[in-house]
Image (cartoon, rainbow, N blue to C red):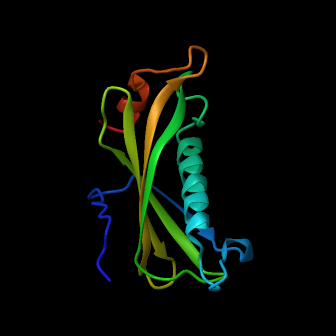
C-alpha cells in the first residue's frame, strides 16, 4: 500500500504524554479506530496547552480553531496498549501554526501513527482570526 499523505515530523518534540487505548477507542476490526486517533490527538494537544498554562480558549486571551487534520497510520493499536504522544509546534504563519504528533507504543517504541493538526488563532469576541500571540511564540522558541 502506498502512503497517500506524508507528514514530515520536526526533529525534536517539546512535550510528551501517555494515553492508554480504551475499549471505546476500538473499531469493528478490534483495533484503534481512525476517529479515536483524532480524539486522542485532541487530548494530547489539550495536555500540551495545560502544561504551558494555556487552554484552547485562552492563550494570552486568544483561542484556537482547528483548520485541518491529517493522520498517517504505521501500525495497529490494541486495547490496553499505552501510547506515547510527542507534541511539537511549527509552520507558523501570521495567524496559524501546526501541531505535530508522533504516536508510539510505550513498550516497544514502535511508531503507531503520526498526525498533524492545523490551528488558527481566533478571537471569539470579534469572531475573526488574529495574530499568533507573542507569548506563545516566545515560550515555544519560535
Most foreground residue, 50 or 7: 7
Query: In the orientation shown, which residue stands out farthest toward the right?
Result: 24
Q: Is residue 5 left or right of residue 110?
A: left
To which quarter of the image does residue 39 belong? bottom right
Which quarter shows the C terminus?
Answer: top left
Q: Is residue 121 above or below residue 38?
A: above
Q: Position of residue 50 (x, y in %)?
A: 59, 43
Q: Position of residue 42 (x, y in %)?
A: 57, 53
Most foreground residue, 79 or 65: 65
* Residue at x 56%, y 65% (from the top left corner): 37
Most foreground residue, 51 or 91: 91
* Residue at x 56%, y 19% (from the top left corner): 127
Q: Position of residue 47 (x, y in %)?
A: 59, 50
Q: Is residue 110 left or right of residue 93?
A: right
Query: In the orientation shown, which residue stands out farthest toward the top?
Result: 126
* Count of numbered circles on the image: 0
* Residue at x 55%, y 80% (from the top left corner): 77
* Residue at x 31%, y 36% (from the top left corner): 92
Q: Is residue 91 left or right of residue 122?
A: left
Q: Position of residue 115 (x, y in %)?
A: 42, 60
Which quarter shows the N terminus?
Answer: bottom left
Q: Is residue 39 above or below residue 32?
A: above
Q: Is residue 43 above or below residue 55?
A: below
Q: Is residue 63 left or right of residue 108?
A: right
Amino acid at each position: 500500500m502506498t502512503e497517500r499523505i506524508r507528514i514530515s515530523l520536526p526533529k525534536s518534540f517539546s512535550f510528551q504524554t501517555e494515553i492508554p487505548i480504551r475499549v471505546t477507542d476500538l473499531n469493528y476490526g478490534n483495533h484503534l479506530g481512525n476517529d479515536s486517533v483524532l480524539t486522542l490527538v485532541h487530548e494530547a494537544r489539550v495536555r500540551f496547552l495545560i502544561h504551558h498554562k494555556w487552554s484552547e480558549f485562552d492563550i494570552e486571551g486568544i483561542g484556537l480553531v482547528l483548520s485541518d487534520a491529517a493522520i498517517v497510520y504505521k501500525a495497529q493499536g490494541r486495547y490496553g496498549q499505552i501510547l506515547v504522544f510527542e507534541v511539537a509546534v511549527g509552520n507558523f504563519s501570521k495567524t496559524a501554526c501546526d501541531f505535530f504528533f508522533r504516536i508510539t507504543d510505550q513498550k516497544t517504541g514502535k511508531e503507531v501513527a503520526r498526525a498533524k493538526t492545523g490551528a488558527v488563532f481566533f478571537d471569539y469576541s470579534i469572531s475573526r482570526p488574529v495574530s499568533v500571540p507573542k507569548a506563545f511564540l516566545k515560550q515555544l522558541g519560535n
